[in-house]
Image (cartoon, grey):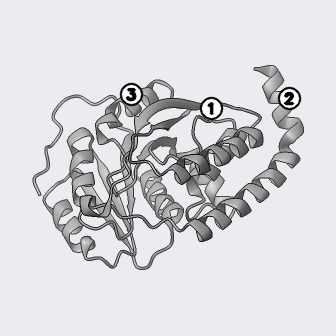
Amino acid sequence: MHIQHIERTLPSTNHLVLIPSYNSGAKVYETVAQARAHWNPVWVVVDGSTDGTTAVLQDMAARDDGLRVWVLPQNQGKGAAVLHGLDQAAQQGFTHALCMDSDGQHPANLIESFMQCSAATPAAMVLGVPVFDASAPALRVWGRKVSNGWAHLETLWAGIGDSLYGFRVYPVEPLRRVMQGQRWMRRFDFDPEAAVRLCWEGVPPINLPAPVKYLQAHEGGVSHFNYRRDNLLLTWMHIRLMLGFLWRLPALMMRKKSI
């Protein structure tokens, strides 16, 4: 697959694009190519995929110095794949990572504007707020509202625009500290828990609108979301976040009054 390389000056050399990928099918090649058209470098963490995409991604990386592929031997979950990438990024001096999904749902054309916002406000996390079209399943849209309501309460309305949308720029070190401090945030619970716990650590959110596509199977769309399993995971996540919130409540109230 042809990749359009970036020649123009970029706003930061400390930012990278990080794409965790698990059995995304051929759509991952398009996602990676689009990301490379807008940023350098792009890293892919293959999370134990068994769909044959690993070899093709490695071949793409062999022909492109701006693309690097990390391969985990078995599926560990989105959060675990992101953490692997963050650890490698920290070792190589990167300070921020824009995370995006491999399945074509996220807008690669907004990578540069999100990176520019992050470079201007490096202490913050830049969160995408989804702009839905007619393809969005009503149940998924309603479910986001529930999760967002919990996230607002758990952070005393610190400003998280959307708790679930995975198109985001994170400061590397604060997120690594949060994840290394507990054993959760390794699977579907990664995105909402990352936003809440970073708010607890004093990392302010900046919200930017970003369209989201829900691709059908004939469009190459692949979804690993399981309503029962993942909603149970989110329920348990919010239970432990509420317990953490109650323990932190005095400090959070003092911080809110000082703003």
Q: Nearer the viewer, residue 59 or 155?
A: 155
Residue 11 drawn at (x, y percent): 33, 28
- Type of the residue with mark 3: Gln
Residue 139 drawn at (x, y percent): 55, 53
Q: CA distance from mark 3 to mark 1?
A: 16 Å
Q: Earlier along the polypeptide chain: callout 2 or callout 3?
A: 3
Is 14 drawn above or below residue 144 in the view shown? above
Is 100 drawn above or below residue 61 in the view shown? above
Asked whether, in this view, residue 230 is left or right of residue 254, the answer is left
Q: Earlier along the polypeptide chain: callout 3 or callout 1?
A: 3
Q: Quadrant of the C terminus?
A: top right
Q: CA distance from mark 2 to mark 3?
A: 31 Å
Number of other residues with Cα within 10 Å of mark 1, as a class: few under 14, some 14 to 19, many 20 or more: some
Query: In this figure, which residue is indicated by the disc labeled 2?
Result: 254
Asked whether, in this view, residue 34 is left or right of residue 18, the answer is left
Whether residue 183 is visible here, answered yes or no, is no
* Image quadrant in which you'd find residue 185: bottom right
Q: Secondary structure at mark 2?
A: helix
Q: Quadrant of the N terminus?
A: bottom left
Q: Secondary structure at mark 3?
A: helix
The residue drawn where x is 37% and y is 55% is 19
Query: In this figure, which residue is indicated by the disc labeled 3?
Result: 116
Q: Nearer the viewer, residue 185 or 139?
A: 139
Query: In this figure, which residue is indicated by the disc labeled 1?
Result: 204
Number of other residues with Cα within 10 Å of mark 3, as a class: few under 14, some 14 to 19, many 20 or more: some
Q: Secondary structure at mark 1?
A: loop
The residue drawn where x is 27% and y is 61% is 220
- Type of the residue with mark 1: Pro
- Type of the residue with mark 2: Met
Q: Earlier along the polypeptide chain: callout 2 or callout 1?
A: 1
Is 238 drawn above or below residue 6 in the view shown? below
Q: Are marks 2 and 3 in contact (CB under 8 Å)?
A: no
